[in-house]
Amino acid sequence: MVKYKSERRWTVAAHCIMIFLTACTVFPFLLLISASFTDESAAIMNGYTLIPTQFSLEAYEYIMKEWAQIGHAYLITIIVTAVGTLTGVIITCMLAYGLARRVPFAGIVGLMIVISM
């Protein structure tokens, strides 16, 4: 519970800042969704708007028509991400095991890890 007026002002200011930052974060996603439903020629002429001037499903038709190529690209992306994540976890575990033991240069290696963070 807010006790003082100064605390209440800070609370209101913090809420206003968070609402602004949330709007700045959500707006690009809304514009992206709107652009996906906008006709290509209308987007070229008028630019992108939150409410499409000419509604079109061409982008989704293209995705369905070219699904083999797009699906293959997504599969490669998922595989690369999974292999990269697994490799990173394995290397981190090996490094953590080595640093947990008393090995030469553990202090220097630990310092390099902390500095790189």
Image (tube, helix red, strand yellow):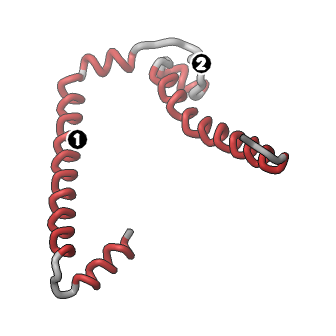
Residue nearer the viewer, 37 or 1? 1
Residue 48: name its quadrant. Answer: top right
In the image, what residue occupies the spot 75% across and 45% down? 13
In the image, what residue occupies the spot 54% across and 24% down? 43
Q: In this view, does 78 lie above or below 30?
A: below
Element at label 1: helix
Q: x and y percent of residue 103 in the render?
A: 16, 83
Q: Is residue 2 above or below residue 34?
A: below
Please, what is the three-letter code of the amino acid marked with disc 2? Ile
Q: In this view, does 2 lie above or below 108?
A: above
Q: x and y percent of residue 70 in the render?
A: 24, 29
Q: x and y percent of residue 74 in the render?
A: 23, 34
Q: In this view, does 92 lie to the left or right of 43?
A: left
Q: Mark 2 points at which residue?
A: 51
Q: Is residue 79 left or right of residue 43?
A: left
Please, what is the three-letter code of the amino acid marked with disc 1? Thr
Q: Name the residue under label 1.
A: 77
Near mark 2 (Cα within 10 A), the count class, few <14, some 14-19 or many ≥20, is: some
Distance between the Cα atoms at labels 1 and 2? Answer: 32 Å
Q: x and y percent of residue 85 in the render?
A: 22, 51
Quarter of the C terminus within the rendering: bottom left
In the image, what residue occupies the spot 78% across and 49% down? 7
Residue nearer the viewer, 103 or 34? 103
- 1 or 2: tag closer to the N-terminus: 2
